Image: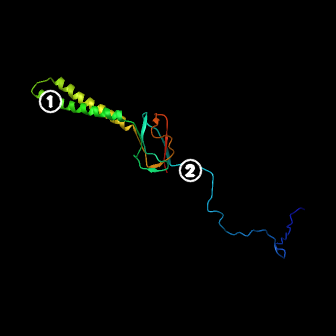
Amino acid sequence: MTGCKKKKVVVNNARQSGPISAEGFVVESHAESENIEVPGSLLPIEETQIRPEVTGRIVQLNIMEGTRVQKGSLLVKLFDQDLQAQMKKLQVQLDISNRTVERQRDLLAINGISQQDFDLSALAVDNLKADMQSTQIAISKTEIRAPYDGKLGLRNVSFGALCITNGYPYEYSAS
């Protein structure tokens, strides 16, 4: 007959008498250095390379590297005296055309001129106003303004330089 017998196992968990050997370190706090140099680069939240929309010579340069500027601040002004002269010429022409329309309005009321002649004079006034608006837009393109509050970066141009539309970026960032 076969069967299973229970075996008694005795485990002795008793420690040996005497000291236990262990390795350890004594830790003390002290300052290593106040300045820590770590290689790396910091990047701004936004960064824009600013280029002019039109070609022109720089006549005013308000860029001091590292300074903070407000949105809309004038950074660079390109030559625009030709456009300013054109605007004055258009203003004089508009004044004369407005006076002509006023006189022709009086003549139209007494049938002194045809409606077509009056309409052509009024059209000339509208055309001059559109030309003035176009010239004003061209003048505004000679001004490079800060697109947002930020800090000026590197300046790659100097006073008197000729800026072309796809050259000479100005680094500008907001941090």
Instruction: Work out whether mark 1 precedes mark 2 in sequence or the reverse, and give the earlier one.
Output: 2
Helix, strand or loop at disc 2? loop
Residue 154 relative to residue 121: left or right: right
Residue 150 relative to residue 98: left or right: right
| Quarter where residue 114 is shown | top left
Image quarter in which the N terminus is found: bottom right
User: Label 1 amino acid?
Assistant: Arg
Residue 48 location (% of width, % of height): 48, 43
The residue at the point 46 percent across, 45 percent down is 63
| Of residues 15 and 165, the one drawn nearer to the viewer in this rendering | 165
- Colour convention of the picture: rainbow
For discs 1 and 2, the disc positioned in front in the rendered view: 1
Real-space Cα separation, disc 1 to disc 2, in angstroms:
68 Å
The residue most toward the right is 1
| Quarter where residue 91 is shown | top left
Q: Residues within 10 Å of mark 1 (few under 14, many from 20)?
A: few
The residue most toward the left is 110
The residue at the point 16 percent across, 24 percent down is 115
User: Label 2 amino acid?
Assistant: Leu
Residue 158 location (% of width, % of height): 48, 40
| Of residues 114 and 135, the one drawn nearer to the viewer in this rendering | 135
The residue at the point 54 percent across, 48 percent down is 43
The residue most toward the front is 160
| Of residues 125 and 68, the one drawn nearer to the viewer in this rendering | 68
Residue 145 location (% of width, % of height): 41, 43
The residue at the point 37 percent across, 35 percent down is 80
Mark 1 — residue?
Answer: 103
